[in-house]
Image (cartoon, rainbow, N blue to C red):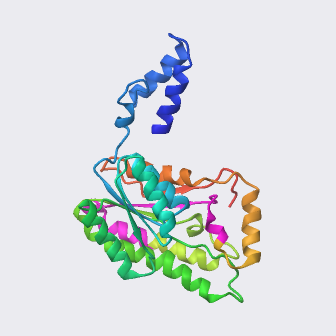
Amino acid sequence: MRKVVGYVHRHLAQRPSGDAEGTAWRYSLMNWGHDPLAKESEAMTRQLDDKVALVTGASSGIGEATAIALAEQGAAVVIAARRTDRLESLRGKLSDDGARVLAVELDVADQAACAAAVESTVEEFGGLDILVNNAGVMLLGPIVGADTTDWDRMIQTNVLGLMYMTDAALPHLIERRGHLIQVSSVAGRVPSRGAGVYNASKFAVNAFSESLRQEITQRGVRVTLVEPGIVATELRDHITNEAAKNSVNARAAEMRQLQSADIAAAIVYAATQPDHVAVNEILVRPTDQGW
């Protein structure tokens, strides 16, 4: 919303005084509670000022964009990932923009490290309100003749890592009636040839998340499943099967891909709803994606 208000503010500033269309735009936004010409409009859009968020896989892509978007909404943000050099760069950027931020080295496949990341969050900021389980790998390839070490990595990261983080965070999310946001994939809905184990890992995320939602929703904890389609990130770069990598890259090149900020916007949308509103599932595909 901040970017929308900023755009409209510039748009209105270029219009002559008394312009009817400009007046209508401003009136519409005022009805939403966002007067683009008021000095305090930016502050009015900061809906997470009293919240603490932990984002895994925050060193690039969707995780990085989500950390930035949550910080823009006023949240204190804990950025967690394995690549500490990238984390430090992001930490500096967020800090320079006035955000409260903590960087934590984290491999989600290490259960003790997951518990330590949550503990560091609570020690630094006094609690935890939002966990964004974003860390994941997509190692596509056929099942027949597969390198099963790829299977191990996907299950350890995409499934067990997400579960470890969820387990460590749950006591704090229950205490503060918080929000668990799981980044899954359209692959968790639609199986496809050449993606069998990745599909299985994301189907597991979806099933786990819905089961947990049924356990904790009446305790005030919201659970949101976000399922992106093709996003222009480095996720595909790590595919070890060259034929699979070439195939998915060729398909992606034929469409207008989602950007990381598109998924971050969906996450912020879910996180900023009133407490009585639980957005349980968001499926986001590129318009051009037919599967």
Establish if 101 lies above or below 246.
above
Q: Residue at x 38, y 73 (%)?
A: 165
* 125 lies left or right of 132: left
Q: Residue at x 23, y 61 (%)?
A: 126
Quick one: which residue is furthest to the top in this view?
18
Rendered location of residue 102, percent (x, y) = 36, 61
Residue 201: say if magenta: no
Establish if 11 lies above or below 237.
above
Quadrant hosting residue 278? bottom left
* 286 lies left or right of 165: right
Magenta residues, as a range? 208-237
Establish if 269 lies above or below 229.
above
Residue 165 in view, yes or no: yes
Q: Quadrant of the C terminus?
A: bottom right
Rendered location of residue 113, percent (x, y) = 38, 78
Residue 33 in view, yes or no: no
Residue 210: say if magenta: yes
Rendered location of residue 227, percent (x, y) = 53, 61
**Foreground residue among 102 and 225:** 102
Q: Residue at x 50, y 75 (%)?
A: 158
Rendered location of residue 285, percent (x, y) = 61, 55
Quadrant hosting residue 37? top left
Establish if 134 lies above or below 10.
below
* Number of numbered callouts drawn: 0
**Foreground residue among 25 and 126:** 126
